[in-house]
Amino acid sequence: MAIVVGSRRTRWLGRALVYAALSLLSLLFLFPLLWVLGLSFKTRMQTFADPPLFLWWPTIENYVDVFGRSDFGLAFLNTLIVSGSAVGLSLCVGVPAAYAFARFPFRGRSFLFFALLVMRMLPPIAVLVPMYVLFSKLGLTTTRFSVVLAYSTFSLPLVVWIMRGFFEDLPAELEESAWIDGANRFTAFRLIVLPLAKPGMVAASILCLQLAWNDFLFAAVLTNNASQTLPVKMMTFSAGDSGVDWGGVTASGMLVILPVIIFSFLAQRHLVAGLSSGAVKG
């Protein structure tokens, strides 16, 4: 009896230590985000208080100031349009391409797949100038479409890489059964493969959305005041005569990351399934 009680206490102690370690790690990773959140609810005097205030009466004047700027709403709309279009374009092109890489043994398949990955490995600054020159020749600079194309350039290899591994995990017998029933390859792909590949598509969408939503470099160079996105618009809070408006910067920063966090939480079940079902293979 004593042995049973002792082993039970040992298990409870082990669980307590594990939860304590996980809580500490979570706090360490979330501390910068919590600090930014706290600054967004402080006045300017509270922000520069010495020593720092850990207990204070929160204020929403920073968020009121951010929402009171008409250009912030336009920037949010631009970010939504550009990011959504980039994700949609990357999926429309990348999913069929990944299916072709997974199902058709054509010559040069490995080389083309490696070439796509090389494009993803390049630093964005390496292709920014050629893109700007190309878009200038085509008359696309300072337009949303130029930013969509720039984002899709880096999102497309990510979609192909994730979805290729996912398609390779799907049994080819499912499509062969559909062919026997009279369906052609496109119909089998649309009715059989795509529904099963939904978790992988959601995972790819979230990763591409984070890439496009948070980008600053391409949006800063390829947009103007009418097509600026949120990361670029945030810079206006640090360009005033009185120095950096930390309240405005942190409040706008929280508003920028909030939609991605909400979308990720809503789709986390599909995200985990997509990343664990062959998405890291390839």
Image (cartoon, rainbow, N blue to C red):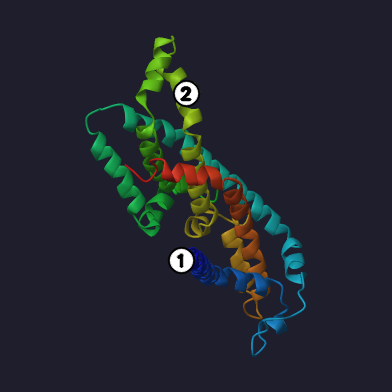
The secondary structure type at the circle numbered 2 is: helix
User: How far across and down, in percent of the image, does residue 149 sit?
Assistant: 47, 44
Q: Nearer the viewer, residue 149 or 175?
A: 175
Q: Which residue is mark 1?
A: 3
Q: Residue at x 64, y 55 (%)?
A: 75
Q: Nearer the viewer, residue 15 or 258?
A: 15
Name which of mark 1 and mark 2 comes first in the sequence: 1
Crowd band around label 2 with a 10 angstrom C-alpha radius: few (<14), some (14–19), many (20+): some
Q: Residue at x 38, y 44 (%)?
A: 157
Q: Which residue is mark 2?
A: 192
**162 left or right, relative to 43:** left
**44 left or right, relative to 98:** right
Q: Is residue 55 above or below residue 109?
A: below
Which residue appears farthest toward the bottom when viewing the image? 50
Crowd band around label 1 with a 10 angstrom C-alpha radius: few (<14), some (14–19), many (20+): few
Which residue appears farthest toward the left when viewing the image? 107
User: How far across and down, in percent of the image, does residue 262 sit?
Assistant: 63, 52
Q: Residue at x 41, y 30 (%)?
A: 96
**68 left or right, relative to 244:** right
Q: Quadrant of the C terminus?
A: top left
